[in-house]
Amino acid sequence: MIKKVLIAEDHESINLSLQKTFEEFGITNPDYVYYCDDALMRIQKAIQAHQSYDLLITDLHFEQDHREQKIADGAALIAAARKLQPDLKILVFSATGKPATIEGLLNEQEIDGYVCKGRNDFKELIQAIVQINQNQRHFPGNLRLSIHQKNTYEFSELDIIIISQLIAGTKQQKIPDYLKKNQIRPSSLSSVEKRLNAIKDALNFTTNEQLIAHCVKMGIV
Amino acid sequence: MIKKVLIAEDHESINLSLQKTFEEFGITNPDYVYYCDDALMRIQKAIQAHQSYDLLITDLHFEQDHREQKIADGAALIAAARKLQPDLKILVFSATGKPATIEGLLNEQEIDGYVCKGRNDFKELIQAIVQINQNQRHFPGNLRLSIHQKNTYEFSELDIIIISQLIAGTKQQKIPDYLKKNQIRPSSLSSVEKRLNAIKDALNFTTNEQLIAHCVKMGIV
DNA sequence: ATATTTTTTACGGGAACCCGTAAACAGGTG
DNA sequence: CACCTGTTTACGGGTTCCCGTAAAAAATAT
């Protein structure tokens, strides 16, 4: 039975909304934090006091501000929390509906649920909590569909660096220099070309211009 | 004095949050909708009933679902609302902090405020409403910076066609063919090159990739 | 109609990019 | 160690792009 809940969400408006609704429901007595570091500290303290949390509800993306954080985003928080308390139930409540991200969390961290922020997010959130309470897992139905949907490509760290360099105006030939200077491997021109070709191929593009437009439009960079 | 408020926001969690907080404050008696079309209809009916709204709070991005909508996003809603009721105060509450988008709304639609969804969004939202109530406008501080750096280049019809073609994936060499087919002049390859060089020169760019990124980011295409 | 200016086009050499191939370099496995 | 496998590099020829120059065409003026 879920009794003790912790909510990590940086958007004040959403956080307040969760607070009010939970209090209204009166089901649990949840705690709310705006930073990942605070969330982890709470989890740790709760364990020490032998009053560990039953459920963590967290966003994935956290805006960074003046307060320096050791844990930058929800994924890192989840990993850290799992380490401290393996039996903690985790429900992700996020807007970034990238299927690859969700699947990664599902498989690697074995999260118990995912709810996408959107039109009916609140009803779904409640439903998810009910399901998790019954030791079930909750995921959006479109997950399977969207996994197979075309024009989806999971950009690697390197991909984003290369594309960012292109956007910054560095010529393709000079990118190896940049990579070597920053100790990034692979760093050869052939590798850069290979990477760009692979991406373009995966997305059915033929020119760099198309790729750049897509990435900017999709907010990948 | 702001008395009658309409809120258009598709995220249920945020919408609920706004509802609860406004009711708590007891300042106004706001209406809430989840779709742009509903928002416009409410505005129209309110005018007909001689009880027009004083303030519209709206998101920019609306997720599309089964319900087919004539108005797809916040920008279109704002334009339509302004047409119906020019004196309506408009406050944008959105997460897409693209300076170009905000500036466009500011200049063309003369919106009265913009609040970015984030860590302290709710306090800022309240502050914005107070300011608008005093016939002031409210914008985030970082906007000023981005206004000053505005790269002034007037894109011609031809420029936009060329850039659009690049984004569509047509090679630079094939663009003359396209231009001739559509009876656009000048149509030679040299002219296309000249145009692109002139633009890049004016904006201090060196590569096509930079230019494409800029145009997409600024919403020119 | 002729000259002048501006714009458009044509062309060519050099730089950058695309693409396939082959060699060098890892990381496992018997 | 030799072997296989997969990845990263190095290289070369063919294409596309960049850039300057000069001819051709169009617009304007004399």
Image: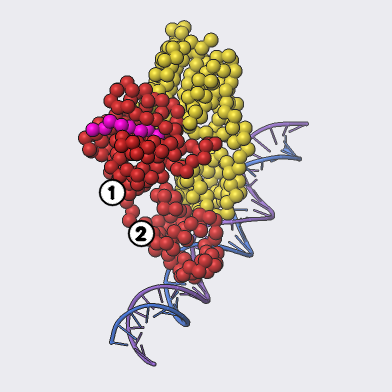
Chain colours: A yellow, B red, C purple, D blue
Q: Quadrant of residue A128?
A: top right
Nearer-the-camera pick, A146 or B174: A146
Single out the residue that lies furthest toward the left.
B134
Instruction: Write down the chain letter for disc 2.
Output: B
Which residue is drawn at the image coordinates 37% and 46% (left, top)? Answer: B79
> Contact (CB < 8 A) between labels 1 and 2?
no
Three-letter residue code for mark 1: His
Could you classify mark 2 by the number of other residues whose Cα lies within 10 Å: few (under 14), some (14-19), or many (20 or more)? few
What residue is pinned by disc 2?
B154
Which residue is drawn at the image coordinates 44% and 53% (left, top)? Answer: B221
Nearer-the-camera pick, A42 or B112: B112
Label of residue A86 in the image: none
What residue is pinned by disc 1?
B148
Which residue is drawn at the image coordinates 49% and 50% (left, top)? Answer: A213
Q: Earlier in the sequence, mark 1 or mark 2?
A: 1
Three-letter residue code for mark 2: Glu
Magenta-drawn stretch contains B4: yes
Provide residue A136's location: percent of width, then percent of height. Answer: 59, 18
Extent of the magenta region: B1-8
Provide residue B177's location: percent of width, then percent of height. Answer: 55, 67
